[in-house]
Structure formats: C-alpha cells, structure tokens
Amino acid sequence: MFLLASLSAFAQRYEKVPFGDFEQWVVRYIDESQIIGGNRKTLYVIGPTDTIVGNDAYDYKKTIWATSNAFAKVMGITKTSTNVTPDRGPTGRCAKLATQYAYCKVAGMVNIKVLAAGSIYWGKMLEPITGVSDPYSFMDWGIPFTKRPKAMVLNYRSVIPNTGKLVKGTTFRTIEFDGYDPAEIMFVLQYRWEDEKGNIHAKRVGTAFYHVDQTSHGWVSDFRIPVIYGDARKSPDYKPYMDLITGEKTMYALNSKGKKKPVVEEGWADADCPVTHAIMAVTSGSQGAFIGALDNILWVDEIRLEY
C-alpha cells in the first residue's frame, strides 16, 4: 500500500499558474472625467507588483491575466469600474470577484447603471472600452499553450445567495426576472488556425468546466476539475454548460496582423489533437454580459494545473 501511494504521488505533478497565487497585483490610478466628478479611481491587474498613475491602456506583456475591471472612454468621458480586487485569503492574498452595478452620474443624476460579473481570464483587455455593445469584442481571449494537463486545481470560497432573481442591467434601464446564476470556473484547450483572410478558426480539444451553485462553508481547498479530452458530450461528466462557445458568448482574439476577429468553436477535435491555445476564466456569474445575480461573490486562490 505504501508503494502504491508513493507511485501515485510520483505520477502526479502540479504546475503553478503564473500569478495564480494572487500575491502580486498592479495598482492603477485613473482620473475620471470632471463631468462625472473627476475622482481618482483604483483599478487592479493581476501581475508583477507595480503602481501606475495615468489614463493609459495597460501593457499586458508581463502577465497572462486580464480582468473585468474596466477603463472606459465613451463619447469623451473617462469612467472606470472595479469588481475584481485583492482580498485576504487563508495564507496571504487571494482574488475577490463580485457581481455588482457600475454607475455613471452626470449632473448629479444616475443615467447609466450596468450590471457586471467579476471575471478573471487568460488574455488581454483591449483598452479603453468605448461602448457597451458587444462587450466580448473588447477582450482578447486565450494565450498560446501546447501542454495537456489532467486537471485544473484551485482553492475557492463562495457566496451564492440563490434568491431566484436575475437582473439585466444595460445603460438606461434594468429588468428583473426569474433565473439562476451560478459562478463559473472554465479551462478550455483549443486547436486554432488562421485562414488566408485572417479569420481565426478553432476546435475544442480539452474541456474543464464547473459551476459553483451554492454558498461554501469556508474555503474549499485543492478542488480538482478534470480536463475531458475530445468530444466532452460523450463523457458521463458532461453538462450542457460545457458546450462549444458560440452565439452571444463568442470570444474574440487578435490575429497575426493584430486585427480583432471572432473565435468561433466550430466543433470537437479528436482527443489526441494538438493544443495551440488555452482559455482559463473564472467569473462570479455565468449568464453572460450584463445579466446576473446581484451579490454573487467568488474568492479564488492557488490556481494550478495537474499533470
């Protein structure tokens, strides 16, 4: 028994995800426009410790992580929103992701109220954001990646009120309706290629999804989400939310010429297909842009990959 346990431990190997311990953050100070108060606001980026003052787009060369924290410039008005922040975890810092409203006041009146889930993902935010239509187009999703991990492993803590009510909040009005909004943890492996016109194509090679649908009792440590290779629909662990990413949730990426293109997953690849890119994303909601359950909160820490 001791020998078998030793062999099992030897066969398992973990690689830390860069900055996945959330001990390092970039602090950005952005000055909002005078017409909405002219306050200096704080944005956070997961990356090598730094402090940046100025209304400039962040250079993501030093990190693989982007967040839903927004630096926007719409019709000449500079505005920010922050729903991903560093927080205290069991052994240091962690990341706190919250579903909440972002407000924009002009002349003392609230005329814009947008709901946003707190999200972190591998890729880049294409700053500044210039509007609320097609929000995924302001994100460059995924990074080059060729490895084949067995699982994604992390620690998490959750507050999921499960009131049965969802809110859709876009600009000038909000709508409340019945629904369900678990937090989502996603790790996707893709085979991507680019055609002669610069369009990006993709097939799904590996799938690791999990929905956090309940408030946890403190921290859940070493939570393991296996990667399903090939057509995930053939696995007994398959859930509908693990399906190909298309439609309203279609992601975007920059092609070889730096032009923004949609990345539509066109099908399931064979289990032994090479991997060219990976997308990791963790979010306090799973309903998509501007829809969610207010006050969902997800804390994450110590993200790593098992081989």
Image (spheres, rainbow, N blue to C red):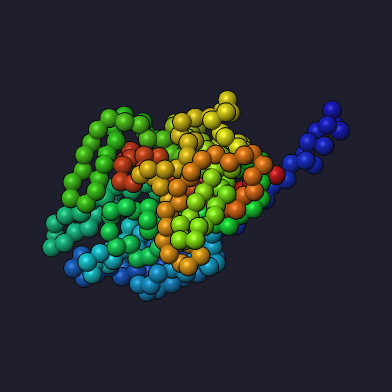
User: Which residue extends farthest front?
Assistant: 196
In the image, residue 239 sits, relative to residue 189, either above or below, namely above
Query: Picture coordinates of residue 240 (x, y %)?
Result: 46, 31
Q: Is residue 155 left or right of residue 174?
A: right
Query: Picture coordinates of residue 12 (x, y %)?
Result: 74, 41
In the image, residue 21 sits, relative to residue 40, either above or below, namely above
In the image, residue 295 sits, relative to residue 76, either above or below, namely above
- Viewer-closest of 196 and 248: 196
Query: Picture coordinates of residue 264 (x, y %)?
Result: 45, 47
Query: Picture coordinates of residue 200 (x, y %)?
Result: 48, 55
Count the labels in the image. Answer: 0
Q: Is residue 152 left or right of residue 289?
A: right
Q: Residue at x 38, y 52 (%)?
A: 136
Q: Is residue 65 visible?
A: no
- Viewer-closest of 83 and 239: 239
Q: Residue at x 16, y 61 (%)?
A: 106
User: Which residue extends farthest right?
Assistant: 3
Q: Quadrant of the N terminus?
A: top right
- Viewer-closest of 154 and 235: 235
Residue 292: which quarter of the image?
top left
Residue 221: which quarter of the image?
top right
Q: Quadrant of the C terminus?
A: top right
Q: Residue at x 43, y 50 (%)?
A: 251
Q: Is residue 9 visible?
A: yes
